[in-house]
Image (cartoon, rainbow, N blue to C red):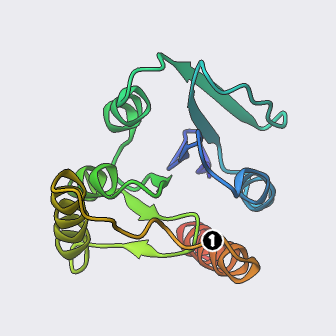
């Protein structure tokens, strides 16, 4: 989204390696004329439309997260399912949404991180834990609705 003097007010960053809603992000963002930066490791090949860009980073474990954390600004939006990255970005004043349409905020992030930590401890102890549930059509619809709401609020509509 740009203001009258053509400076970018905010942009959208996408943790793109395993994001199932890339097309939807581009479609909604384009309708609001918002710049989208998809950040992906070299291990993932992707193409985007003319109004978006792709930043390729090393295939190291946290390279995408580090790029986003170092480039995001207050008021920017990030799409990620990574609770750790979401927590970091919230402290920078960014808006963070999951590909399932879940809004991350300071009231829930600590409990999500605690659950993740407990699951990691359980796995290290040899216990079986559940992975994420299947991505459903309703998740995609919820994401589009929430993402549209974020961008329309930012645009003052």
Horizontal side of 66 relative to 106 (left or right) equals: right
Q: Residue at x 39, y 26 (%)?
A: 63
Mark 1 surroundings within 10 Å by alpha-carbon count, few (fewer than 14), some (14 through 19), many (20 or more): few
Residue 57 image point, x, y percent: 50, 19
Compared with 10, 130 (above or below) is: below
Measured as percent of width and height from the top left, residue 81 is found at 46, 58
Where, by quadrant of the figure, is residue 53 drawn? Answer: top right
Image coordinates for residue 72, horizontal then vertical, percent? 39, 40
Q: Residue furthest front?
A: 126
Q: Is residue 65 left or right of residue 93?
A: right
Q: Position of residue 96 (x, y in %)?
A: 42, 62
Q: Nearer the viewer, residue 57 or 132?
A: 132
Viewer-proximal residue among 38 and 133: 133
Going 58% across and 64% down the picture, which residue do you hit? 99
How many numbered discs?
1
What secondary structure is found at the residue carrying circle 1? loop
Residue at image mark 1: 134
**Residue 6 visible in the current orientation:** no
């Amino acid at each position: 989204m740009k203001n009258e003097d053509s400076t970018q007010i905010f942009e959208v960053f996408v943790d793109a390696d395993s994001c199932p809603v890339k097309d939807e992000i581009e479609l909604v963002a384009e309708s609001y004329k918002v710049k989208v930066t998809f950040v992906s490791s070299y291990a993932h090949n992707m193409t985007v439309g003319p109004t978006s860009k792709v930043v390729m980073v090393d295939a190291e474990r946290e390279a995408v997260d580090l790029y986003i954390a170092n480039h995001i600004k207050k008021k920017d939006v990030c799409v990620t399912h990574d609770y750790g990255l979401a927590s970091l970005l919230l402290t920078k004043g960014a808006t963070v949404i999951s590909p399932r349409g879940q809004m991350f905020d300071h009231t829930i992030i600590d409990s999500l991180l605690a659950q993740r930590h407990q699951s990691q401890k359980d796995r290290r102890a040899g216990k079986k834990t559940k992975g994420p549930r299947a991505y459903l059509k309703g998740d995609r619809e919820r994401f589009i609705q929430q993402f549209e709401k974020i961008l329309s609020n930012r645009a003052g509509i």
